[in-house]
Image (cartoon, coloured by chain):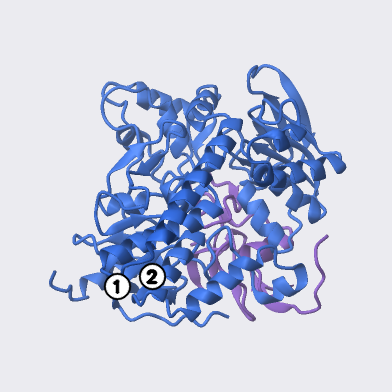
Amino acid sequence: MTPRSAARVEVTVDGRPVLVRPGTSVAAALLEQGRWDFRVDPVSGRDRGPYCGMGVCLECEVTVDARPHVRACLERVREGMRIDTAASGEDT
Amino acid sequence: MSADTAAPAALTADAAVVGAGPAGLAAALELARAGLDVLLLDEQAEPGGQYYRRPGPEVLDAVGDHRPEGGRLVARVRAAGVRVLSGHTVWGVDDDRRTLLAASPGGAAVRVRARWVVAATGAYERSVPFPGWQLPGVVTPGLAQHMSAEGVRLGRRAVVAGSGPFLLPVACALLERGVRVVAVAEAGRPYTPGPASLGALRFPARLAELASYAARLARHGVRVHQDTVVARAHGADRVEAVTLTRFSDPERVVARHGVDLLCVGYGFRPQADLPRLLGCAVDRDPATGDTVPRLTPTGRSSVPHVYVVGEAAGAAGAPTALARGRAAALDILASSGRAPDRGERRRLAVHLASLAGFTRLTAALYPAPAELVPALARRLPGPTLVCRCECVTADAVRAAAAAEGGSDVPAVKGGTRAGMGLCQARECGPALEALRAGGPGTGTVPARVPLRPLPLAAVLELADTPGEDV
């Protein structure tokens, strides 16, 4: 079962405040929110989500603190982090 | 948080080790203990690689640490004085074959010049395309394992498919997080007459682990289909269902399952592109079809100061990776006049040979990727996206491969853009190589600079960095 630990840190996902578990990757935090639409494939215009989980496929790229093209699977969440996915409308 | 500091733009070391998984950690530890100045570069937030990858301490407190020995090894590496540069992506090499070009976590340029280079760049999962593999919710088994280790329940209903021993622990990890695994589909027939036969083989102790996963799946009522592959993932914006068919009879549907998670992988491929950039001679592994560096038993490449260790030398598992890392380090120490214990080197050689026997035995249980991948690629329906980055279909790749003079892989890439996207053909590479008709030219995807997409600033800054005289 998904562990319940009391501690949470607040991050912003697409402009909305969200409480996530500290120590997890950005990808894990988004997936726990039920989010699989991390980016839009520029060729097909379709949603893409994390695939390899180890920094190879680049499908999980999001914008973190205004830094585009951050691999969500390799980045840890931090208190106050701003995470923007393709759904934020601020496509990079 | 890790205490690894930002690096200045130009660094030198006796040895630069690239990759902080089991092999890189073992090599770095051995070298540093003998008094060498060692730099260990790794692109992840913390050392550990894939095998010892750990979420942050808060998660470990809540979920538990499934591989505490990894944390202990990292602690010993730091205590031995190894300079660890986490979050650093090595993306190229300079002409001297001793200088690594890297990007710091902030995207700044870093040059590392070393007397010895140890490539411990690991492996990644072998993907074979199928219709719908680009849908969100279709992932590699490795992603499922990592996210489960982070405490995430990835979905409600999952199918785990592909080939190789890794599928079983991944299915167990999902179960542990409350995901209902409706089926495991293995392309081969390794568990015939049944999982119990595993214990009767020559390495019962090593295979006992696999047997225990199989037993756990049986207890949960998870059906393990053999000779079964994913034919198609269905869904609009997310995966909704999967069709499984017989590998030996593609027309025969084994099952259709509604799923919100589909994990598919066909074992591991060595990530040997850094050795290739360093000019190391490579060969095609006849069993896997993968490009592997040509190495001595202790990991020395055709470029005498470059060693390749761990999964990058050929996927063989963590115990082998640790032993290869140590063996290479002892070889380097012998070459630098620090005579390591002869007996120790002999013992390690015997240990490596025994591990190689186990690897061969395990591999023999499963279909050889060199045969499996082309068989799967040949039957792909025309509209299937072979290259998911650039959305290039099987039809387009086949047309390019059949074109006059278009049969080698670079020509197919150039003609279709397949393999020219963000992942640099790491996901579609096996299929691209399999769909090439043969004939003249190279049948392998070339190694390409930069090894990862990176901010332009990381390259431009190098132009302002004075190079050292070689």
Locate residue B283: give its quadrant. Answer: top left
Of badges 2 and 1, the one in the foreground is: 2
Please tell me the colour of chain A.
purple
- Which residue is at a point 52% across and 49% down the rendered structure image? A41
Circle 1 residue: B14
Q: Are there few (<14), some (14-19), or many (20+) residues within 10 Å of tag 2? A: many
- Which residue is at a point 66% across and 27% down the rendered structure image? B189
Circle 2 residue: B31
Q: Quadrant of the N terminus of chain B?
A: bottom right
- Which residue is at a point 71% across and 31% down the rendered structure image? B191
Residue B308, image x and y in percent? Answer: 37, 54
- Looking at the rendered structure, the kind of residue marked 1 is Asp
Q: Quadrant of the C terminus of chain B?
A: bottom left
**Horizontally, is B438 left or right of B258 in the view?**
left
**Residue B422 in sight from this viewpoint:** no
**Residue B424 in sight from this viewpoint:** yes
Residue B182, image x and y in percent? Answer: 80, 39
The subunit carrying tag 2 is B
Residue B307, image x and y in percent? Answer: 33, 56
The subunit carrying tag 1 is B
Residue B123, image x and y in percent? Answer: 48, 50
- Looking at the rendered structure, the kind of residue marked 2 is Leu
- Which residue is at a point 71% across and 71% down the rendered structure image? B59
Mark 1 element type: strand
Task: Name the residue at the left extreme.
Answer: B469
Please tell me the colour of chain B.
blue
B51 and B257: which one is in front? B51
Task: Name the residue at the front extreme.
Answer: B343
